[in-house]
Image (tube, rainbow, N blue to C red):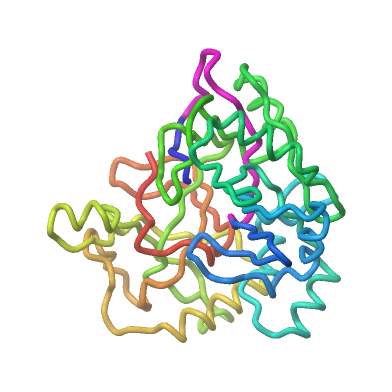
């Protein structure tokens, strides 16, 4: 189940509020071991070996947990950039080395199945009560409590701690797998947008063969919306992202983009006419923080935050 974007927390007594964790969404299947599945349905269990003992911590219960894999910075604040070093790995020696350097935590916030019983149709507060009863609390896993009422106070608390924001969840609501619902609303302290990378501009001077900025966009509709209208999705250009890269990330992105090179622009709407632009297949999804959308429909002052490997590019639309 996915959240819609909201500018301010909803008011009234019918809502619970949770901290929004800046990580990778995952389902944890616990039944004689652990299997982790990404939002795209990919098995990512091998990438996070420190989470294997989660299955043994539930006293024999079988369960499916919805949550977020996060990498904490200084033991307090989730860092998506820090998590990048753990994403997309396939070599077991590299996975083990990175796990020793950068530990992750599975933060559980919902329960979809428990001991031969699907719980998706149960109201939100009942699912949370059952989740709390499992005692998901260990060296690399936790289930933080939710807060009833006064979402503005929690949002301010997250802002002071430099956290991403909050998620409001409607009391009494059921869990709708794979659906984006108004029963869940995300309110961020900083504006963010997932974006599809369609090209790049080389750097200048000594960085002429390396990435200088990303040319990014979003689709004008979801696959389901396009199917209903009986037309193809169109990739809309949203601007260039030229800050927020470490030297290591510049090198990694340059290699990934060159491996996906194509001759023509993948953008269908407002494709940029920039001398020296290099195009790539629209297969990579990144996250950018930005100040606002301009009247021309591009991002103002965007900064790169990291790649997402748990999001299908075709699902990336403009968040409003």
* Front position in the image: 293 or 276: 293
Q: Is residue 14 above or below residue 319?
A: above
Residue 202: % across, % down: 47, 76
Q: Residue at x 28, y 72 (%)?
A: 266
Residue at 62% over, 70% down = 44
Please provide percent x and percent y for residue 306.
Answer: 58, 61
Pinpoint residue 174: horizontal percent, then vertical percent.
48, 35
Compared to 65, does 263 lie above or below?
below
Tell me what residue is drawn at x 31 percent, y 59 percent.
237
Q: Residue furthest left?
A: 230
**Residue 261 as seen in the image, left or right of residue 86:** left
Find residue 305 and report its image quarter: bottom right
* Quadrant into which the C terminus falls: top left
**Is residue 268 one of those drawn in magenta?**
no
- In the picture shown, does residue 269 fall above or below 77? below
User: Which residue occupies the extreme front position in the image?
Assistant: 116
Rendering coords of residue 264 (x, y %): 26, 79
**Outermost residue, top direction?**
12
Which region shows up in magenta? 7-25
- Residue 176 drawn above or below residue 32: above
User: Going by the image, does 77 lie left or right of 11?
Assistant: right
- Total labels: the figure holds 0
Q: Foreground: 193 or 178?
A: 178
């Amino acid at each position: 189940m996915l959240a819609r974007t909201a500018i301010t927390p909803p008011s009234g007594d019918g809502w619970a509020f949770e901290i929004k964790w800046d990580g990778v969404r995952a389902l944890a299947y616990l039944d004689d071991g652990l299997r982790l599945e990404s939002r795209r349905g990919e098995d990512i269990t091998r990438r996070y070996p420190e989470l294997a003992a989660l299955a043994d911590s539930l006293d024999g219960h079988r369960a499916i947990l919805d949550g977020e894999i996060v990498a904490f910075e200084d033991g307090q604040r989730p860092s998506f950039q820090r998590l990048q070093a753990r994403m997309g790995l396939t070599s077991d020696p590299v996975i083990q080395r990175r796990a020793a350097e950068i530990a992750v935590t599975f933060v559980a916030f919902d329960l979809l199945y428990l001991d031969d019983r699907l719980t998706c149709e149960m109201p939100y507060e009942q699912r949370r009560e059952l989740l709390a009863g499992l005692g998901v609390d260990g060296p690399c896993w936790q289930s933080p409590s939710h807060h009833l009422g006064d979402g503005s106070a929690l949002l301010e608390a997250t802002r002071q701690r430099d956290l991403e924001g909050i998620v409001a969840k409607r009391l009494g609501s059921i869990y709708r797998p794979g659906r984006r619902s108004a029963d869940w609303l995300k309110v961020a302290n900083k504006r963010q947008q997932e974006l599809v990378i369609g090209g790049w501009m080389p750097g200048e001077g000594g960085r002429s063969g390396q990435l200088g900025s990303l040319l990014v966009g979003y689709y004008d509709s979801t696959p389901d919306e396009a199917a209903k209208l009986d037309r193809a999705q169109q990739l809309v250009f949203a601007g260039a992202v030229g800050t927020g890269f470490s030297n290591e990330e510049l090198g990694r992105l340059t290699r990934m983009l060159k491996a996906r090179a194509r001759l023509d622009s993948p953008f269908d709407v407002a494709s940029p006419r920039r001398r020296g632009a290099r195009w790539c297949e629209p297969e990579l999804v990144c996250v950018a923080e930005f100040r606002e959308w301009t009247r021309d429909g591009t991002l103002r002052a965007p900064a790169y935050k990291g790649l997402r490997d748990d999001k299908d590019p075709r699902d990336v639309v403009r968040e409003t």
